[in-house]
Amino acid sequence: MVDPAHDQLRTPGGADPAGMPPGPWLLVVGMHRSGTSALTGACAALGLQAPSVDDRMDWPESNPEHWESLALALHDDALLHHLEGSWDAPPDLPPGWELGSAIRPVPPPGPAAARAYPEPGPLVWKDPRACLLLPYWRRVLPSPPAALLVWRPPMAVARSLRARDGLALAHGLALWERYNRSALENLAGVDTYVVDYDALLDDPGPELGRIAAWISGLAPFAPFAGSWEPGAMAAHLSSGLRHQSGDTEDELVLPSQRRLAAILAGLGGGHRPLDAGILPPESGWTTALIEGQRALWLRTRRVGTLEDEVNRLRGASPVTATAGPPAPGAGAGPPAPGDGEGATWSLDALAGRLRGVLRRLDGDRTRGAAGSG
């Protein structure tokens, strides 16, 4: 469950609209493994600016082309990490989180966005994390965006996540519910075209034509539409892109997830703006499963912090096999921080804490495996 963005660049972005490309911005919003890459590529073929080649995520094992900005993906990762979550263990964000203090340390997004989109004019941006983080982006984008919301049946997404990331089907279904429900909530009031990805692959031409006409009819995009090429969009879609289906193991899909899929199916087409109505509450199973994954993620991150501290102390001071904390009553406490023995004692204490956390983490993993069997 490694996010590929972290293997390629480690410079996160942040939260101030200064320096953002003016756009207009078209957002391709959707859960991971739901067709956001293919639809973004089709919009780039239409004539919208895609992320710069130098800034594009490169992960061919997952998709031939992601059409995803690496800098902005890392920016969204930084937001999630400061909110104590990740793409596969997202936090349950309360209303107004985008105004809170947790994300203040994240730098402004302008430099990351400028790196992704160096040219003026209409642009298309996709990052599945935006389903969760749209309240933040609606504050920092320089003009009201429009959106394409693309979705797939829950089991098709869960099977795809299992094949790509090794996620359990129940975990994938919970993420499908959290992401799609968040997207519908967070796109309220935004001009949005809802796309059934599987239906799009069945007959791309007519639906892509409708999407192109809808984008062209939006006031911010209309001045640019004369040079667009709707006929070039279909080259980015084919039935061969459908690697997983949702027609097996469907009994695992919860009633709340079925209702959410029915709402998405009923919203197909353009909305100016989107109003999904009253959504069913998130299932308790989804909330509990994701919170358990997040607790495990937080402990794993803590282990990494302790390992870094142990390695730092090892580089700063020699380690002796006999070193340890002072015996009870043998002085006022551990040696001074600047003393070599003090550094060694701190190292042993941290190593002991690390071993304890690792034991608890192994216990959590064992219990989680038993519970999912």
Image: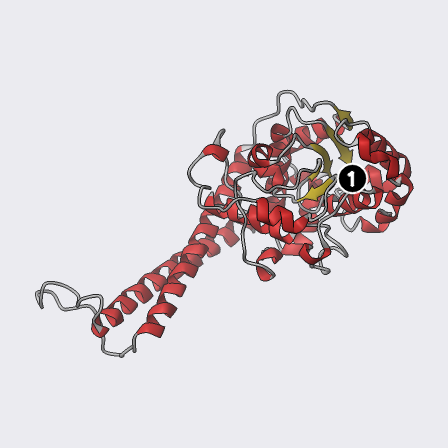
Q: x and y percent of residue 19 in the render?
A: 59, 42
Quarter of the image with the N terminus in it = bottom right
Label 1 residue SS: helix
Q: Name the residue rendered at 61%, 41% in the picture.
A: 20
Image position of 217 (left or right of 136) = right
- In the image, residue 352 sits, relative to residue 186, either above or below, namely below
Q: x and y percent of residue 106 in the render?
A: 48, 46
Three-letter amino acid code at disc 1? Tyr
Residue wearing tag 1: 197
Q: Name the residue rendered at 40%, 61% in the picture.
A: 358
Q: Residues within 10 Å of mark 1 (few under 14, many from 20)?
A: many
Image position of 5 (left or right of 196) = left
Image position of 338 (left or right of 28) = left
Looking at the image, which is closer to me, 266 or 234?
Answer: 234
- In the image, residue 147 sits, relative to residue 61, either above or below, namely above
Looking at the image, which is closer to me, 163 or 342?
Answer: 342
